[in-house]
Image (cartoon, helix red, strand yellow):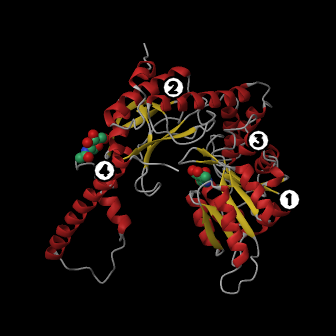
Amino acid sequence: MITIPYLTALSTYFSYGLLFAFGQLRDFFRKIIDWWQSGDLQGYAPICLGLEDFYIRRLYNRIQDCFGRPISSAPDAWFDVVERYSNDNNKTLKRTTKISRCLNLGSYNYLGFAASDEYCTPRAIESLKKFSPSTCSSRVDGGTTTLHKELEECVANFVGKPDAMVTGMGYVTNSAILPVLVGKGGLIISDSLNHNSIVNGARGSGATVRVFQHNTPSHLEKVLREQISEGQPRTHRPWKKIIVIVEGIYSMEGELCQLPEIVAICKKYKAYVYLDEAHSIGAVGKTGRGVCELLGVDTADVDIMMGTFTKSFGSCGGYIAGSKEVIQYLKYTCPAHLYATSVSPPAAQQIISAIKVILGEDGTSRGAQKLARIRENSNFFRSELQKMGFEVLGDNDSPVMPIMLYNPAKIPAFSRECLKQNVAVVTVAFPATPLLLARARICISASHTKEDLLRALEVISRVGDMVGIKYFPAEPSKQETNVIKLE
Ligand SMILES: Cc1ncc(COP(=O)(O)O)c(C=O)c1O
Ligand SMILES: *[C@@H]1O[C@H](CO)[C@@H](O)[C@H](O)[C@H]1NC(C)=O
C-alpha cells in the first residue's frame, strides 16, 4: 500500500479541485456563448460527453506535450525525440524537423532486443523478404506459416508448458480469450490492479467478477471462501468454474506477484490460476523464464500462462500457454485465432530469434549477459533512487520502478525538465492510476550502460530537487554521499 504524506495529499486534492472548478467555470461560460451564437444542434446528442471529455479538455490537454511524443528512431537506450511546438497554448502540437537525442527511460525494452540486434535483425529482414509484412489472413485460413508453427513450439518450450497459441496483439490475448474460457455461471477473481485488457476481457465474458486487494493473498482467500459458500447469484448453485487472475510484474507498480502464496490458496480451493507475464517473461528469472522461475513456482501449478512479445522480445503479439487440451480448445473457439489476422511474419521471426539468444542457442552467452545486466541495472538504479529520497514503488529485481509525483503540477514539471536535459521519462496519471497517485515510471533496460544510469540518476536527482518530489530525504549527514557526480 502507498502511504501519501498528509500535506501532499491535501495539496493534490486542492490542485485537482482548483483545476476542476476553473474548468467547470470555463465550460459554463462556453455553453452560454455557444447557446447565444447558435442553438442549432440538429437533434443529435453530443458525441463526446461526460467526465472523460471534461478531463481531456480541461486537464489532459494542458499537459499533453508530455504524452505521445513522436520518436524517430528505434527505442534503444538512447533515441531521437521529435521536437514540437504549438501556436495555441498546446491545444494542438506541430512536429518540427528537429530532434533531440535522449536517454530512454520509458520503453519496455527490457533486454535491448527492440533495437538492431546482430542475431535477430538479419533474420527478421530475411523473413520479411521470404514472407511479407502481413499474412493477410487469419490463422485458420491462410495465415499459418511455418514461422507461426515454429513460434508456438518455441514459446511452449520456453515458458514450460505443453502447448501454446500466439495472437497478433497482447491486449487482445487477454480481452478475447477470457470470454472463451469462462462465461455465465463462472467466477473471475481478479487483482484490483490488473491491466485494462484483463478488466475488459473479464467484463466481456459475462462471468461474475470479484476483485481482491492488490497482491494480498489473505484477501484473495477471504473472497474465495465467501464466494464459494454463496455460489452463483440468486440460484446459489456452485460456480461452474473459478479463475483467479494475476500479473507477474504489475506494470504501474513495479511489484512482483505473491505467486507462491496465491498458487497455494488456489490449489486449496480448486480455482484455476491465470498468470499474465507481459512484463516478467524474458525479464526476470535465471534463464528469463519469468516469475515462476524467479519465485520457484512449478509451471504445472499455473493453469493458463499468458504473456506478450512487446516487451522483452522487442516484437509484437501475445501468447497463451497451457495444456494441450486447453490450447486445442482455444484454437477452435478464440475469435483472435479465427477472425483476426495472424502475427506479422517478421515479428514472429524476431521473437523466435530473441528466444534463441536468451537460451544461448545462437552459440553465444549474450542472452545470459543481458539477463544479468537487466538485474544488476535495475537493482542499482532502484537503490540509488531510494537513497536520494524518492518514493520508489516496487520490488527488487523488477525493471519497472515508479517514482511518485502525486501533485498534478509535478507531472509536466518533472517530464519537461527531464526532457530539457535529454532524459525521456514516461509519466502516468489518471485514468491509468488513481487520481491521487500520479507517478513517473522508469523502465530499465539491459542496454543501458553504467554511464547511462549515472547520468540518468544525476538528472533525476537535480530535477527531483527542483520539482520537490524527494518525499523521504536522507539525514543531512548522509547527504554528501547521496550525490552522484559525473565528470
Ligand atoms: C499486464 C499487461 N497485459 C497485457 C498488455 C497488453 O499487451 P500489448 O501491449 O502487447 O498489446 C499489457 C501492456 O502493456 C500489460 O501490461
Ligand atoms: C506547452 O508545452 C511546453 C513544452 O513543450 C511548455 O514548456 C509550455 O509551458 C506549455 N504551455 C502551456 C500554456 O501549458
Amino acid at dot 4 = Ser
Whole-number angstrom distance, CA of label 2 to CA of label 4: 32 Å
Please, what secondary structure does the residue beneath circle 3 have? helix
User: x, y (%) of residue 459?
Assistant: 40, 27
The answer to whether one can see residue 369 in this image is yes
Question: Contact, CB < 8 Å: mark 2 with mark 4?
Answer: no
User: x, y (%) of residue 128?
Assistant: 67, 42
Q: Residue at 45% of width from left, 19% of height from top?
A: 481
Q: Residue at 62% of width from left, 60% of height from top?
A: 172
Residue assigned mark 1? 324
Q: Residues within 10 Å of mark 2 (few under 14, many from 20)?
A: many
Whole-number angstrom distance, CA of label 3 to CA of label 1: 21 Å
Amino acid at dot 1 = Lys
Closer to the camera in the image, 262 or 354: 262
Amino acid at dot 2 = Leu
Residue assigned mark 4? 11
